[in-house]
Image (cartoon, helix red, strand yellow):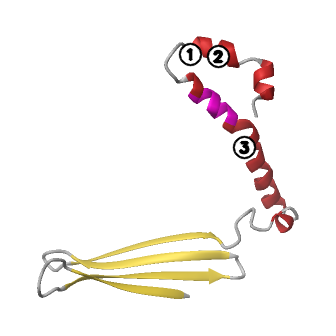
Amino acid sequence: VLGKLQQQHSAGAANSSLTGVTAHLLAHSAQERLFAVREVSLVFDKSGLPLLEAVSSGFDARPVWTEPSADSRDGLRCFVMVMDVVLMVFCLPLLRLFRLCQQPGSAGSCLRRYANAWALADWP
């Protein structure tokens, strides 16, 4: 577990006073291959009332595409890699076509010009 502590002070005053404390924690689970990040803030409002706020998030310690040879042996990671390629090859060119048809002018003429079997097959 790694941690970091920050103190927050009021700005502009000659006698700066403490207005809050924030702690950042990073934990790693080797068994689950996950990282967890936790941010806890204790802030004092102008009346002196303490306000506690906590935010947590988790993410994979070994994301897909960092080791493609190892990822190809894991069924779910291999599926994610294949779907990434499908997205790049098929879906992104269609988005480019859609943006092109949004330009000023007739959308109908754009579709007649670009939306045919040969243009879509040759697009990527």
Q: Earlier in the sequence, mark 3 or mark 2?
A: 3
Residue 117 versus residue 31 in the image, above or below = above
Residue under numbered circle 1: 107
Q: Which mark is residue 23?
A: none
Residue under numbered circle 3: 88
Residue 79: x and y in percent read 80, 54
The residue depicted at 12 percent of the width and 88 percent of the height is 15
Report whether 15 appears left or right of 86.
left
Residues at circles 2 and 1 in contact by the CB criterion of under 8 Å? yes
The amino acid marked with disc number 1 is Ala
What predominant SS class does the magenta segment belong to? helix
Report whether 52 appears left or right of 86.
left
Image quadrant in which you'd find residue 48: bottom left
Q: Residues within 10 Å of mark 1 (few under 14, many from 20)?
A: some
Q: Please, what secondary structure does the residue beneath circle 1 have?
A: helix
Residue under numbered circle 2: 111
The amino acid marked with disc number 2 is Leu
72 and 124: which is toward the camera: 124
Residue 14: x and y in percent read 11, 85
The residue depicted at 48 percent of the width and 72 percent of the height is 56
The amino acid marked with disc number 3 is Met
Write the start and end of the magenta stretch as one range: 93-99
Report whether 1 appears left or right of 85.
left
CA distance separating discs 3 and 2 = 22 Å
